[in-house]
Image (cartoon, grey):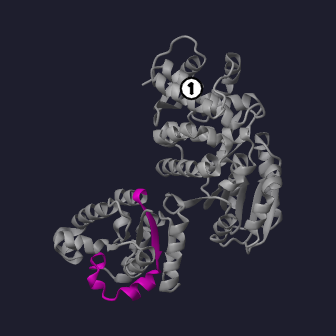
Amino acid sequence: MRHLVLSGFMATGKSTLGPRVAQMLGLPFVDSDDSIEAAAGKSVAELWQSDGEAGFRAIESHVVGELLGRAAPHVIALGGGAVAQRELRQLALERAWIATLEASAESVATRMGDAASRPSLAGHEPRVRIAQLLDARADAYAECHAKVVTDRIGIEESVGEILRAYRRDAVLVPLGKRSYTVDVVRDAPDRLTDAIERLSPTRVFVVTDAVVERARSAELDAALVAVRAPVHRVALPSGEAHKTLASVEVIWSAALGAGADRGSVVVAYGGGVVCDLAGFAASTLLRGVAWVACPTTLLAMVDAGIGGKTGIDFASGKNLVGTFHQPKGVVCDVGHLSTLSARERSAGLAEVVKIALAADVELLERIEAMAPLLARGSPDVLMPIVRRAVELKARFVARDERDESLRALLNIGHTVGHALETHGGFARRLHGEAVSIGIAVELAAAERLGLTTSSARETAVRVLDALGLPTKAAPSELAEAWIHASKDKKRTGTEIDWPIVTRPGEGRVVRIAIDGLRRAILAETPVVTPG
């Protein structure tokens, strides 16, 4: 159980709802303004007058940091401007679950009474200043696990909404107004229903593939039966070979033929290929409509379904055409994994190993320790591993939404992996199998360049082997596949931004000459270590 934080503008009900929520959960309640006044020996208004807003915010940051640092979970009501401080907001997102309480500017003005008692409104026409502050803080307030509009419903209903959302315990991808949550659940089709209904769609277009439709149609039917908008389905051929513009055109034609409008919602119900295709179609349909991802493979749950990277393949390379278009919600139901083959499950685990190598050595150790259970598909073992991978992916996306720097670490092993996939016509290996080989080959190259240690390569290979994944390719195949690596989308001129593992749980991106990387990959003549 984590801290439950109530955020939002003044007079939205934090101090009223907080004690009730705390009572229902059996947790202590604390109002940050009360704690600030106790620490400073002054009222909030006196602090603003004596220290100015900057001085008040410094004290607020210290006090709220202390509250969030408490080991026992609390219900904490924050002042209206607390989460507008970026560092404090990030701390709250790391240590707590956040609900933002919302109300219209008119409701706030009516509820707050004497505007003179509100320091942030002093010297301004209250309604104008309220509107200005709400606009300025909109992105900060949007980075929350749930929103509750308190001027539309009563106190008890507001408490109920907060409690239901808190117990849902979704993972947040904080991206300002583009923020969304990821549910990691087991056999819960109603979560997909809720994700769709929250958007109040005019029409719903479900994109799936023939294999998933056969294996998981009953679960899809259970999720869609309560959707109130008209529902249309598009079933595509299965496999990476069909991740093409022709498949996107099928989705466009079906949607436009059924009367799609800007209120329509596209639902991706399938693996990584379906998520990429559906997301790309949604990003371009009518210049962009909302979409929801329901990944049904392990690989898609920890990778393609989260982060908004969409795209299609060309004969010359993988994912060379695409967009960034964040979903409005993601539902990772590990119940779907029961129909995966052992091979597909292991392939998905390659992406979990990748993110653990880049950012979480403890996760890497857990994967190795539980490799036999993970390979057998135990849902009780898989679920926390999936959730942790989702949390890590959300962290990367939040810090580098458009893959310009840090997020490139999630491409560890993909330079070689994508080249092998393309060389094999997307038929010889599954994506995760190609990435597994790519991880081992690229770590060996990084070791030759003095950029990583032998222990990093040995650890990675040991974990991948334990999961039954391949880690080798014939030198002749690597040489033949290299032409595709030289067209990698991370390339700039004759150089490429190459993500590497420096040691287990840590990585960085280096810029290296493509020809130098080729020689290191193919173990040819020694090359100069890049800076």
Q: Position of residue 440 (x, y in %)?
A: 58, 26
Q: Is residue 54 magenta?
A: no
134 and 408: which is toward the camera: 408
* Residue 61 visible, this orientation: yes
Q: Position of residue 109 (x, y in %)?
A: 39, 85
Asked which secondary structure carries label 1, the reply is helix
Position of residue 451 relative to residue 71, above or below, is above
Viewport quadrant of the N terminus: bottom left
Q: Which residues are magenta?
A: 94-122
Q: Is residue 241 left or right of residue 130?
A: right
Q: Is residue 109 magenta?
A: yes
Q: Position of residue 28 (x, y in %)?
A: 35, 72
Q: Is residue 124 left or right of residue 522?
A: left
Position of residue 250 relative to residue 189, above or below, is above
* Residue 494 visible, this orientation: no
Residue at the spot x=66%, y=71% of the render?
Answer: 197
Q: Is residue 376 left or right of residue 509?
A: right
Which residue corresponds to mark 1? 442
Position of residue 66 relative to residue 8, above or below, is above
Residue at the spot x=17%, y=75% of the render?
Answer: 42
Q: Is residue 160 left or right of residue 86?
A: right
Q: Position of residue 170 (x, y in %)?
A: 54, 61
| Quarter location, residue 58 | bottom left
The image shows a total of numbered marks equal to: 1
| Quarter location, residue 258 | bottom right
Viewport quadrant of the C terminus: top left
Position of residue 312 relative to residue 165, above or below, is above
Disc 1 crowd, CA 10 A, few/some/many (<14, 14-19, 20+): many
**Looking at numbered disc 1 in the image, what kind of residue is underneath it?**
Glu
